[in-house]
Image (cartoon, rainbow, N blue to C red):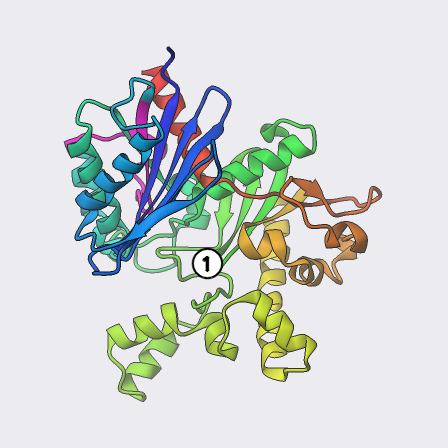
Amino acid sequence: MSSSRVLVLNSGSSSVKYQLLDMSDGSRLAVGLVERIGEESSRLKHTPLSTGETRGFTAAIPDHDAALKAVAAELAKDGLGLDSPELVAIGHRVVHGGKHFTEPTVIDDTVLAEIERLIPVAPLHNPANLTGIRTARALRPDLPQVAVFDTAFHTTMPESAARYAIDVKTADEHRIRRYGFHGTSHAYVSRATAELLGKAPEEVNVIVLHLGNGASASAVRGGKCVDTSMGLTPLEGLVMGTRSGDMDPAVIFHLMRVGGMSADEIDTLLNKKSGLIGLCGDNDMREIRRRIDEGDEEAQLAFDIYIHRLKKYIGAYYAVLGRVDAIAFTAGVGENAAPVREAAVAGLEELGLVVDGELNAVRSDAPRLISPEYARVAVAVVPTDEELEIATQTYALVKAS
């Protein structure tokens, strides 16, 4: 019996998402979610892909240790337990790897310490990621545990793109630079886009637009990231569901001095009460489009601001790359919102960007081109698969060691 299964864990502050994959063919064996950890009404949802029938329960799950034990129990019911000899590794999503972690890494005490040292630049994410890792290591101390970092794909950015134009000593002392996020998605989608074009990643220049509630763009030259829209934190860049994206930093000083707001209040404003929800009260693109169809001017303006920023980044990354072979839309909005895709490239015909209306309207879970055959630049919809990317990187590392 070959060992080819990888469990992928994505631990949040009060949740654990998981998938069990068989890397002999990349198939999923089970998927699930534990949410509201620490509450009386914690909930576990588990779906074995052999049946496709979701089961679960609602009960108090006090901490991540209890959550992972509950996950292990559900997997065991399907003959997929964590004690299975076929389980070769556990892959963990870790949001921030700083400059140090440029590739997937087998976790030991030194790696844990470095992830912990990065908490000041990822206070919302790294602590939860660490909790999941420590819990999984305690459950299976004999099994390789691998960290796959959201920031790793972007470590190929040149210093000219990664540095902020502030005092170098201050920046280095406090690790202030552009790290970028959604790296596993950008890596997967840029590679899948090249495959869609029938080319090797090294031959293709791609602009990847990861548009979900969080949104980011990247410029990928020959399979390597040379620029990305998110920076020190996931706040920089595109207009997002609840985040402002790019903004004059002096706005913060103005809100402190004139508005009397604290640093924490401004942090909450920019990360949770801005973006689309700040502009029109909704962060669901489907609802915004419904309101636009009914003539809602507030929703229309929010959409226009969203598209304006998106179009600016397409133009900027076109200039950075010099030659663009494809633009790939991915994630929840990118994969499903045809009006966003159409509006994002409208008026960019001189750059070789055109969307075919009929192709764009098709709904599909498969990677596909939505540009006409004559278009100079391919426009694609490429569903992302971050869990498969984490599992692939984890499995490759473990098999090579």
Residue 266 position, x and y percent, is 31, 75
Q: Nearer the viewer, residue 168 or 343?
A: 343
Q: Which residues are magenta?
A: 88-109
Q: Is residue 64 above or below residue 293?
A: above
Q: Is residue 233 above or below residue 157?
A: below
Q: Residue furthest top?
A: 1
Is 49 on the left-hand or right-hand side of 201? left
Residue 98 position, x and y percent, is 30, 44
Is 57 on the left-hand or right-hand side of 315? left
The type of residue carrying mark 1 is Gly
Q: Nearer the viewer, residue 103 or 247?
A: 103
Number of labels in the image equals: 1
Could you tell me which residue is drawn at 36 percent across and 30 percent down?
78
Could you tell me which residue is drawn at 43 percent across and 68 percent down?
242
Residue 86 in view: yes
Q: Inspect the magenta stretch and tell me whether residue 363 lies in it.
A: no
Q: Secondary structure at mark 1?
A: loop
Q: Residue furthest right?
A: 374
Residue 341 position, x and y percent, is 67, 57
- Residue 68 location, quadrant: top left
Q: Residue furthest bottom?
A: 258
The quadrant the C terminus occupies is: top left
Residue 38 position, x and y percent, is 20, 57
Q: Inspect the magenta stretch and tell me whether residue 104 lies in it.
A: yes
Could you tell me which residue is drawn at 83 percent across and 42 percent down?
373
- Residue 314 location, quadrant: bottom right
Residue for badge 1 = 214
Residue 324 in view: no
The quadrant the N terminus occupies is: top left
